[in-house]
Image (tube, rainbow, N blue to C red):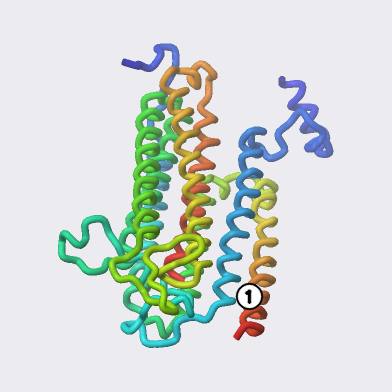
């Protein structure tokens, strides 16, 4: 070992010649980074496509309080996503963006618990890893539940349906959409669906690593680097949501 | 019940590290709250101001997640650049497709 280290120091040229980690990160971590880069391209393409298709449609020009859903122009997102579970029982008419805001906070907090699991892993603290991984999984499942509710609400439609070209449309599907042009619904399903699938697979992978930590596989291995790798994936899911939140709900 | 194996030495919590993570969490929460405040107080007539601020704040949030939570800010420069520089292609695609979208709009309407 010591001889090898000296050899590397002697010649800087051998940095990429094998035998050392040029990035000072393990193979698995570097490959996770490159996978995430490719995934970032996929999500960027989806979000930029949203931008392009939105620019091919007219935007609503009238006064905001008079806004009505129409297939003639792109809807204002905060008029579409204004429902919260049980709000009618509480006598609230509209809660624009509150539910997605809650989802955003859930994902931020699960990202923090993930980072605490990684920190516990670095200290060989099995109990800490178990605790924080479990909180992270719980956050992911809560987020998925919220998304399922949001999708169900979006598909079934709001209480007031719009009347477009003599047709009465309720809710949103791939071919017809109560809230605006059909493309708006298609992009909603595609982008939040693809992100939701990432959350789902993230929860699954998190659970596998949680299980491995619990039965002591990682402890016997002598390090908890797997927690770090799934952590990268989980943070990426949070990162994508930050962009989805801005470009789908705010802009 | 699972207990730590006796031969494994558990090191104490790195308080500075945890403090840093909590600091980042508060930044992210505060920026999100600020975005909400802007969404509800700044009228839609100032669409461009709103959108520029939203996108700027999003990039700040993305920076904190990638640099601190994903630890990329503390990796070697070559790894940092390998991940960040290819994202320039995305910037390129934004320009291409936004112009394309405008062109389609002008043809249709």
Question: Where is the N terminus of chain A found, in terms of image quarters?
Answer: top right
Percent of width and height locating residue B47: 45, 81
At 33% from the left edge and 71% from the top edge, which residue is drawn? A161
At 53% from the left edge and 42% from the top edge, which residue is drawn? A233
Q: Is residue A121 visible?
A: yes
Q: Would residue A25 appear left or right of B10 to someone viewing this image?
A: right
Percent of width and height locating residue A170: 37, 66
The residue most toward the left is A90
Percent of width and height locating residue B95: 66, 72
Q: Is residue B35 visible?
A: no
- Label 1 resides on the chain identified as B
Name the residue tied to disc 1: B101
- The quarter of the picture where residue B7 lies is top left
Percent of width and height locating residue A204: 47, 34
Q: Nearer the viewer, residue A213 or A244?
A: A244
At 38% from the left edge and 76% from the top edge, which residue is drawn? A163
């Amino acid at each position: 070992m010591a001889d090898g280290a000296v050899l590397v120091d002697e010649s800087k040229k051998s940095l990429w010649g094998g035998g050392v980690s040029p990035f000072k990160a393990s193979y698995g971590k570097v490959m996770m980074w490159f996978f995430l880069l490719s995934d970032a391209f996929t999500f960027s393409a989806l979000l930029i496509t949203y931008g392009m298709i939105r620019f091919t449609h007219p935007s609503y020009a009238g006064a905001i309080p008079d806004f009505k859903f129409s297939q003639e122009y792109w809807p204002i997102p905060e008029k579409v996503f204004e429902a919260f579970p049980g709000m009618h029982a509480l006598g609230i008419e509209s809660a624009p963006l509150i539910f997605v805001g809650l989802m955003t906070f859930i994902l931020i907090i699960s990202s923090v618990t993930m980072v605490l699991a990684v920190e516990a892993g670095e200290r060989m603290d099995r109990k800490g890893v178990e605790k924080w991984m479990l909180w992270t999984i719980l956050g992911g499942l809560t987020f998925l539940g919220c998304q399922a509710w949001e999708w169900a609400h979006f598909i079934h439609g709001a209480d007031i349906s719009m009347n477009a070209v003599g047709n009465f449309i309720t809710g949103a599907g791939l071919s017809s959409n109560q809230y605006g042009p059909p493309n708006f619904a298609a992009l909603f399903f595609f982008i939040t669906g693809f992100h939701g699938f990432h959350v789902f697979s993230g929860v699954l992978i998190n659970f596998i690593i949680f299980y491995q930590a619990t039965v002591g596989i990682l402890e016997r291995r002598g390090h908890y680097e797997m927690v770090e790798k799934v952590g990268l994936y989980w943070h990426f899911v949070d990162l994508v949501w930050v962009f989805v939140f801005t470009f789908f709900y705010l802009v | 019940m699972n207990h730590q194996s006796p031969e494994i030495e558990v090191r104490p919590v790195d308080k500075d590290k945890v403090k840093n993570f909590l600091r980042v969490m508060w930044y992210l929460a505060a920026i999100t709250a600020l975005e909400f405040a802007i969404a509800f107080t700044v009228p839609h007539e100032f669409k461009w101001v709103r959108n520029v601020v939203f996108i700027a704040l999003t990039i700040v949030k993305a920076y904190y997640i990638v640099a601190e939570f994903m630890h990329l800010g503390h990796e070697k420069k070559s790894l940092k650049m390998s991940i960040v520089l290819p994202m320039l292609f995305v910037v390129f695609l934004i320009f291409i497709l936004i112009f394309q979208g405008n062109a389609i709009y002008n043809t249709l309407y």
